[in-house]
Amino acid sequence: MVASFFMLTSIPYPAPGIWYNIYGISVMSTEQIIGIAAGVLTSTSMVPQLVKLVKEKKADGISPVMLIVLIAGLALWATYGIIKKDWPIIITNAFAFLLNLVLLILRQLYKNNK
């Protein structure tokens, strides 16, 4: 049934792992969906730490070296995304870069609070 629909409308038979809209046009592959989901989860992973830091105004348990290394890695990932022209990589890593930069700044502001 599906094959005959695509033959009648001269749309090639759908490839496995590709998502199509109601017009038979490919929207996203399963690979892209997994990549975007991974990027969103990874990018937002530090939000709870940031919320806790803002609420408690204590930064004694946060390693600045870890944040600096993470920020450098995120900057490289965003640069890689720009080179590859891959928007999900650019957006998720740029967001995570900014989030962790704010975390590092707040960590420095609150480092002496006990």
Image (spheres, rainbow, N blue to C red):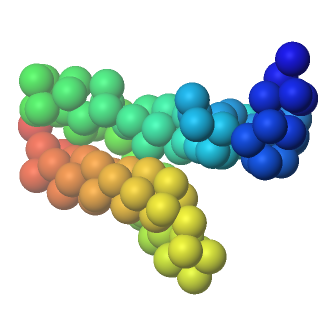
The percent coordinates of residue 53 (x first, y second) are 20, 32
Question: Residue placed at 39% from the left, 51% from the top?
Answer: 96
Residue 28 appears anywhere in the view? no
Quarter occupied by residue 17: top right
Compared with 4, 85 (above or below) is: below
The percent coordinates of residue 87 (x first, y second) are 48, 62
Count the numbered circles shown.
0
Farthest front residue in view: 8
Image quarter of the C terminus: top left
Question: Residue placed at 12% from the left, 24% from the top?
Answer: 56
Foreground residue among 80 and 106: 80
Foreground residue among 49 and 113: 49
Foreground residue among 105 and 80: 80
| Residue 73 in the figure: left or right of residue 111 | right
| Residue 6 in the figure: left or right of residue 48 | right
Foreground residue among 56 and 20: 20
The percent coordinates of residue 92 (x first, y second) are 44, 51
Compared with 5, 82 (above or below) is: below
| Residue 13 in the figure: left or right of residue 44 | right
| Residue 106 in the figure: left or right of residue 12 | left
